[in-house]
Image (tube, helix red, strand yellow):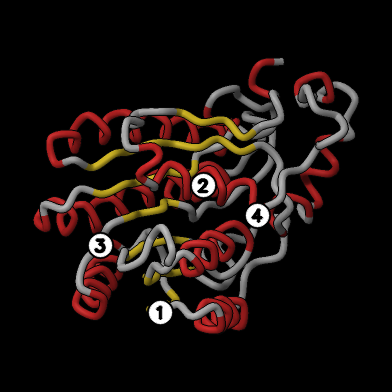
Amino acid sequence: MGQFDGKVVYITGIARGQGRNHALRFAREGASIIGLDIAGPVADHTTYPPATPDDLAETARLVEEAGGKILARQGDVRDLAFQQQLVADGVEQFGGLDVVVVNAGVLTWGLSWEMSEEQFTDVIDVNLVGAWKTLRATLPSMIEAKNGGSVVIVSSVAGLKAMPVQASYSASKYGLTGLAQVVAKEVAPYRIRVNSIHPYAVNTPMGVADSSALEVFSTERFTRFFPSMMDYNPVAEPDEVSDAILYLCSDAAKSLTGVQLPIDMGHSKV
């Protein structure tokens, strides 16, 4: 028996990293998964390796190997019609929708006055507008079903404490923090809870294989902005983030909504 037996979970950005880990963890707890990932380059200004169609196929294989059911498609969170169709097909296949994890995101680096227009608008479009489109595609089904549910929006510690050289990323993540607050208030009458989580560094390709991040973190004039309280634990594992998401979506957190949960080694308090 799993704590999410019979539940249906929609997750964006599932090809690898945090999204894959969330899908696997929910599947092991009995949930069916509806997921998407662009599984390819998002923009030419990102400096970490993109996910691939093979990564997405591997996520599906791993979920099924764990005994779970999954409907996974390659697509862009910026495409509202694509998401609406995926939700409709997933609800038809699995019988409902109970949990939404707004996970997909991108990151770019640059000084505010040197960024290209694309570096700013692409990140806002994927991280913030894409998140709204995810909610626009999923919430009507949850509301109509009248079964309640849970939404977790993956913001960032950069949505609580602004980071240098991350104007578009921090702006998008602060936007997600506000979006989560608005939606939590709007859907509370439907017994749907909405919370945001705020990771710092996570051991994923986006988190530890970004050449620009490594350069910024070693730049002397910026290093004072990046310390945490836990030098002995500088990078979280994906399971630590999944632990928080599964908790927020479980009955153990039935009194929690509108919460901003940091998973940041104390960084936001330094």
* Mark positioned earlier in the residue sequence (2 or 4): 4
* Mark positioned earlier in the residue sequence (2 or 3): 3
Picture layout, residue 93 above or below residue 229: below
Mark seen at residue 45: 4
Marks 3/4: CA–CA distance: 35 Å
Q: In x, y percent, where is residue 60?
A: 51, 80
* Mark positioned earlier in the residue sequence (4 or 1): 4
Residue located 38% across and 60% down the image: 4
Which residue corresponds to mark 2? 123
Which residue corresponds to mark 3? 97
Pick out the residue farthest to the front: 1
Residue located 56% across and 65% down the image: 20
Query: What amino acid is at disc 3?
Result: Leu
Picture layout, residue 166 above or below residue 92: above
Picture layout, residue 153 above or below residue 138: above
Which residue corresponds to mark 1? 69
Q: Quadrant of the C terminus?
A: top right
